[in-house]
Image (cartoon, coloured by chain):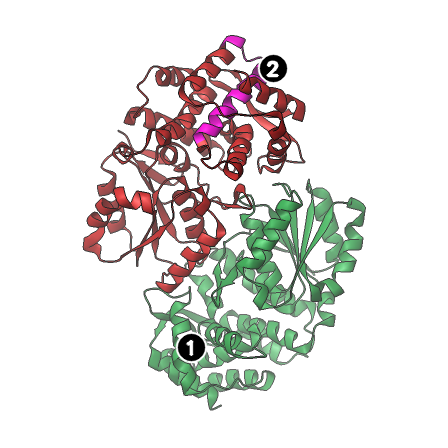
Chain colours: A green, B red
């Protein structure tokens, strides 16, 4: 499987631990800091530690697993550990984990001493197809997702479908939603491929194609001024549902479950507002509804959801902006949707 | 006085409030957030508020004055206010104050929603000649100065010697140390000009020349890989003295007072190690000793000072790195100094 070149850095798909070792040996790093969480640590960390042991300059920083850890208090803890370990500007951070670890580790590295090098080792499907490309780093504050962060590219990304074998099915489904999105926005054939594949563990070819699509979009528009907004499909409404669930549910939705719901709502808006054919709306709704559990929405939740959307960093001047579809495989950015339209789309999803 | 072009942004020296209004009127900003502290607020803020009043989209965020405010807790407070005010990516931050405000405000803006525009209105001499050029943002953590931050350029800088008229003399002296440094590293004639000027309130021409020198150095080396290290003269030892004083003294040294001491120590190291003529060492020592109060150093403080230097982000692999002088007006970077040499230089300063 071919290495993808993104902006200034390579993304490896095979022999990734060996590629990581090669990368580190070539770099003139003073110390290596592996950021990970207790779950990832259990599965992938031993292999990486063994592979780097001969260099004798690695420290591990472990945080609690889960979105609740993705905040500035944990950043402060990590920054303080870097200070205590005497990390200088030639230190390298190796972020081994899901999106929480890669996003937060990227942010910590991009701001420690005004920026040290970091590489990503994404170990969830979501982090592989989404968080590993695009140079977005970030943490949550006051329940607002990724509100604090930077645009900073890693020096390399090392992924491997091997890492996914121990993931629970819900985690696979979470990443799959982003893959389906990549098909919906720019590649009808890829969407069809996905529909017809065994998705319990996506093949390296499917993962590779998703990364390729995201990379093409991001390279054209690194600072999210235009076409990159294509990637927001499902995210205006999906992010709000995710944030709401995180604040209110004991067992909150995963990112992918939330944006799957968001994509159904936004497909409805696409049909209402910009002519997505009704049979394609039905196809999209049916694919997501078969794969994902339905989240229970009721009218009483709508005001809170709208308020979250209005605070979304994707929006400006208080307008709610959606990326929609004219066809499967054809996106359209900057569609302002009224609160009434949004509520209708939520009702459509709830009544599927 | 000519506007200086730094990297991507202009630095204004005259009619600065009017230039700020022009800038804001040309920009398509959704809201304006003025970050300031209670001292600055009292003096400069009313004029700026009046000048921007017709736009009817300005909010004020005020923090406590002083280096103790330059930390992540204050950042969190500011980020939360931006969230509460509904600040979107088209918001502008206007940082009005000394280096604490411009450094921290720059950091907050560069990381809020992965970066919003900001401009600097430096109101202390130090912030005008130092913090306003170079794109360094940052805050302190665990007593380590500027350890968390980014390299991000403001969109413009608006300064005016008028802002300095209400400053206490100690604050003028603090900025003056950086101006003297600019002469020492690259411009003997400017050093002589400064020596022979009335320095109770430096002229706009002198301020302009300092900004010009710093700008030339920074533009050549935006990420501090080489020549920019010239600006570190006095800072390896000076920063340590400043940090020590901040942690231990009721009335701690200003930045300039500390680096004035650092420059004397490092001039001594220059004479010992790389041939700065003894008469120039005497000249430098005498200029600083006349202008600045002597900080009382004793041997018991040396271990703590050395430890701070070893944690300094300027240093790598545990070595202490100094920028030194071969002559007045000629710097030399990357001189590794041993702890013994550093201690000798501290003794020289203490025994002046």
For the question of whether residue B297 can be seen, the reply is yes
Instruction: In the rendered structure, find residue B99 and report the number of the disc placed on it.
Output: none
Tell me which segment is drawn in magenta. B256-279
Rendering coords of residue B207 (x, y %) = 33, 28
Marks 2/1: CA distance?
68 Å
Secondary element at image label 1: helix
Image height of A195 relative to A8, above or below = below
Indicate the chain on which mark 2 is placed. B
Q: Is the magenta stretch mostly helix, strand or loop?
A: helix
> For this view, does A216 lie left or right of residue B55?
right
Residue A305, numbered circle: 1
Seen as rendered, the residue at the extreme bottom is A351
Q: Which of the two residues, B322 or B97, is positioned nearer the viewer here?
A: B97
* Residue shown at 56% from the left, 71% from the top: A178
For residue B44, say whether it is visible.
no
Q: Nearer the viewer, residue B333 or B45?
A: B45
Q: Do marks 2 and 1 share a chain?
A: no
Name the chain under label 1.
Answer: A
Q: Residue B272 carries which label?
A: 2
Q: Is residue A16 above or below residue A182?
A: above
Q: Does the magenta stretch include residue B270?
A: yes
Q: Position of residue B171 (x, y in %)?
A: 36, 32
Of circles 2 and 1, which is in front?
A: 2
């Amino acid at each position: 499987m071919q290495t993808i070149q993104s902006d200034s850095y390579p993304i490896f798909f095979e022999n990734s631990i060996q590629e990581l070792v090669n990368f580190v040996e070539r770099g003139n790093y003073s110390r290596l800091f592996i950021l990970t969480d207790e779950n990832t640590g259990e599965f992938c960390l031993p292999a990486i530690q063994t592979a780097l042991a001969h260099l004798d300059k690695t420290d591990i920083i472990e945080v609690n697993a889960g979105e609740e850890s993705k905040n500035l208090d944990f950043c402060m803890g990590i920054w303080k550990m870097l200070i205590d370990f005497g990390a200088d500007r030639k230190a390298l951070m190796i972020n081994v984990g899901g999106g929480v670890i890669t996003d937060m580790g990227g942010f910590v590295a991009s701001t420690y001493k005004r920026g040290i090098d970091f590489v990503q080792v994404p170990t969830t499907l979501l982090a592989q197809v989404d968080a590993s490309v695009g140079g977005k780093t970030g943490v949550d504050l006051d329940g607002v997702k990724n509100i604090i962060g930077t645009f900073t590219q890693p020096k390399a990304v090392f992924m491997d479908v091997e890492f996914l074998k121990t993931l629970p099915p819900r985690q696979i489904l979470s990443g799959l939603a982003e893959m389906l999105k990549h098909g919906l926005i720019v590649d009808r054939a890829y969407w069809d491929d996905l529909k017809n594949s065994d998705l319990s563990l996506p093949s390296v070819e499917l993962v590779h194609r998703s990364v390729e699509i995201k990379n093409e979009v991001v390279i054209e528009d690194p600072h999210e001024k235009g076409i990159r907004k294509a990637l927001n499909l499902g995210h205006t409404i999906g992010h709000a549902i995710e944030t709401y669930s995180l604040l209110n549910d004991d067992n909150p939705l995963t990112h992918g479950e939330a944006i799957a719901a968001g994509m159904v709502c936004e497909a409805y808006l696409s049909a209402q507002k910009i002519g997505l054919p009704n049979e394609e709306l039905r196809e999209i709704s049916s694919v997501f509804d078969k794969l994902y559990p339905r989240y229970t929405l009721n009218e009483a939740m709508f005001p809170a959801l709208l308020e979250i959307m209005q605070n979304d960093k994707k929006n400006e001047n208080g307008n709610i902006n959606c990326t929609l579809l004219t066809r499967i495989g054809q996106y359209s950015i900057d569609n302002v949707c009224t609160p009434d339209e949004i509520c209708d789309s939520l009702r459509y999803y709830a009544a599927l």
